[in-house]
Image: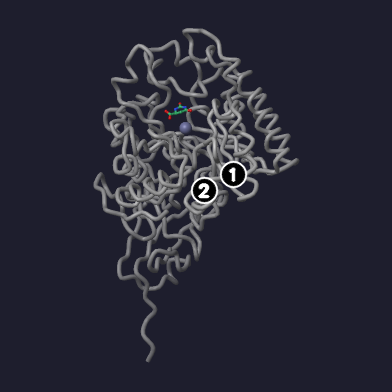
């Protein structure tokens, strides 16, 4: 007699299977999804997790743009607090930006960062390499980073073209923060200090660098209507991808005239309603290649100072903001792909999809109404421009490659993989 088929774990409930929700059983063997079946046909699991009637099973989210701040700025965030923030937000894989102190733009510093993240992160991670005067020196450790990141000051420096050339040679993306500093103005209003034209101008330069070198250009946090139109028109001409953020989709520059002005300061700035609506439309139509948080934590005292640094935390809220839009009927369910399957595919990962052969990165969310309070975030940055927003879902549990890293307010060890 043959033994009954058995797997490590089976999740039974309503699951997101690419564009739609379906009642299924998801079988997990080791760190991989082994099968997705009708509940009645599920194999026996060592552990069985039966979802409640108000619960949904989602793939783990993949965030291509975060700042974990370690090494160098651990008072703002570190790999432990930042990855806890991710796990609580249903994010199972983060890609960390190189603007550390010192910047992650040499092989030694990238190796050091991988070691740190390995020992402390409870979610999986990838890294970007920063720009340097000698990009070629990054060749021997090319397997340590997913892509390059150029800030406005890099884009307008002699370092830009060699970085694009090397990226083309290595087949890696160049993530660009597109703003032209020569168009910045003196204004007490942040959105006027860094006007929309600065983004349009920098997008032109980035597109020219990509066209002339053959590199894959990824424009991150695109925030204005003309830039979106230009990027969409350029997609046919070469490998050009872009992402948008929840804050540019959902918030506008009216916040700069409110008590949240300092908290809401971010680069690129929040824009007028016309631009906000265009960013939202790029997400709704599926034109955007990804949603990213640009999780950019700073100490609260820094944010409340005379000249606050730009950025705020995003990892704990992004998925639930997205689900709020879906549940309230403004976005189709397929918008979930923007924060899961689409970024995973860009990064070449078997993640972000509930299907056999993919990593068993799973998130259980529950329908529940709650009010956002910055002071309750697990990030070291305990504030948010979404203060007081009513959410429709909360994270119950998060699994990274089959291991539970978050459940009901408590955190597991995880054990990250780069
Ligand atoms: O708002 C931002 N914060 N924009 C950036 O370009 C950098 C980031 C940070 O690292 O704080
Ligand atoms: Zn950033």
Q: Are marks 2 and 1 in contact (CB under 8 Å)?
A: yes
Relative to 118, 232 lies left or right: right
Relative to 402, 248 lies left or right: right
Of the residues under marks 2 and 1, which one precedes in the sequence? 2
Residue 160 falls in image quadrant: top right
Image coords of residue 59 (percent x, y): 45, 52
Residue 373 falls in image quadrant: top left
Residue name at image x 43 percent, y 35 percent: 103
User: Which residue is under mark 1?
Assistant: 173
Residue name at image x 33 percent, y 34 percent: 72
Dot label at residue 102: none
Q: Secondary structure at mark 1?
A: strand
Q: Residues within 10 Å of mark 1 (few under 14, many from 20)?
A: many
Image coords of residue 224 (percent x, y): 61, 24
**Quadrant observed for ligand 1 in the rendered image:** top left
Q: As displayed, is residue 353 above or below residue 184?
A: below
Residue name at image x 42 percent, y 60 percent: 360
Q: Residues within 10 Å of mark 2 (few under 14, many from 20)?
A: many
Q: Nearer the viewer, residue 37 or 411?
A: 411
Image coords of residue 382 (percent x, y): 30, 28
Image coords of residue 355 (percent x, y): 50, 61
Q: Nearer the viewer, residue 275 or 131?
A: 131
Q: Secondary structure at mark 2?
A: loop
Where does the N terminus fall, quadrant-wise? Answer: bottom left
Q: As displayed, is residue 318 above or below residue 51?
A: above
Dot label at residue 146: 2
Q: Nearer the viewer, residue 73 or 291?
A: 73
């Amino acid at each position: 007699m043959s033994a009954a088929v058995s797997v490590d774990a089976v999740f039974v409930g309503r699951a997101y299977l690419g564009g739609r929700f379906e009642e299924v059983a998801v079988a997990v063997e080791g760190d991989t999804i082994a099968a997705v079946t009708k509940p009645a046909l599920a194999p026996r699991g060592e552990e069985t997790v039966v979802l409640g009637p108000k619960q949904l099973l989602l793939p783990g989210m993949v965030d291509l743009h975060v700042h974990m701040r370690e090494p160098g700025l651990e008072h703002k965030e570190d790999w432990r607090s930042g990855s806890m923030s991710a796990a609580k937000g249903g994010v199972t894989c983060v890609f960390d930006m190189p603007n550390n102190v010192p910047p992650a733009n040499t092989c030694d510093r990238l190796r050091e960062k991988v070691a740190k993240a390995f020992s402390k992160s409870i979610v999986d991670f990838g890294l970007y390499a920063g720009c340097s005067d000698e990009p070629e020196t990054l060749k021997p450790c090319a397997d340590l980073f997913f892509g390059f990141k150029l800030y406005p000051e890099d884009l307008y420096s002699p370092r830009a073209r060699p970085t694009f050339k090397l990226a083309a040679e290595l087949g890696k993306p160049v993530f660009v923060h597109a703003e032209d500093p020569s168009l910045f103005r003196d204004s007490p209003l942040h959105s006027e200090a860094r006007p929309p034209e600065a983004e349009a101008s920098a997008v032109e330069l980035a597109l020219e660098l990509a066209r002339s070198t053959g590199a894959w250009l990824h424009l991150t946090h695109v925030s204005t209507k003309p830039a979106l139109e230009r990027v969409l028109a350029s997609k046919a001409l070469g490998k050009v991808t872009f992402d948008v953020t929840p804050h540019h989709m959902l918030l506008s520059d009216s916040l700069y005239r409110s008590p949240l002005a300092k908290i809401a300061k971010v680069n690129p700035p929040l824009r007028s309603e016309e631009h906000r609506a265009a960013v939202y439309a790029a997400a709704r139509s599926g034109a955007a290649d990804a949603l990213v948080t640009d999780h950019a934590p700073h100490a609260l005292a820094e944010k409340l100072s005379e000249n606050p640094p730009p950025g705020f935390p995003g990892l704990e809220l992004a998925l639930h903001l997205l689900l709020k839009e879906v549940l309230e009927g403004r976005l189709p369910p397929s918008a979930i792909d923007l924060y899961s399957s689409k970024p995973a595919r860009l990064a070449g990962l078997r993640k972000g999809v509930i299907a056999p052969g993919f990593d068993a990165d799973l998130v259980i969310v529950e329908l529940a109404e709650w009010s956002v309070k910055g002071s309750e975030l697990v990030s070291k940055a305990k504030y948010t421009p979404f203060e007081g927003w009513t959410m429709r879902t909360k994270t119950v549990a998060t699994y990274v490659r089959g291991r539970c890293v978050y459940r009901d307010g408590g955190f597991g060890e995880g054990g990250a993989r780069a």
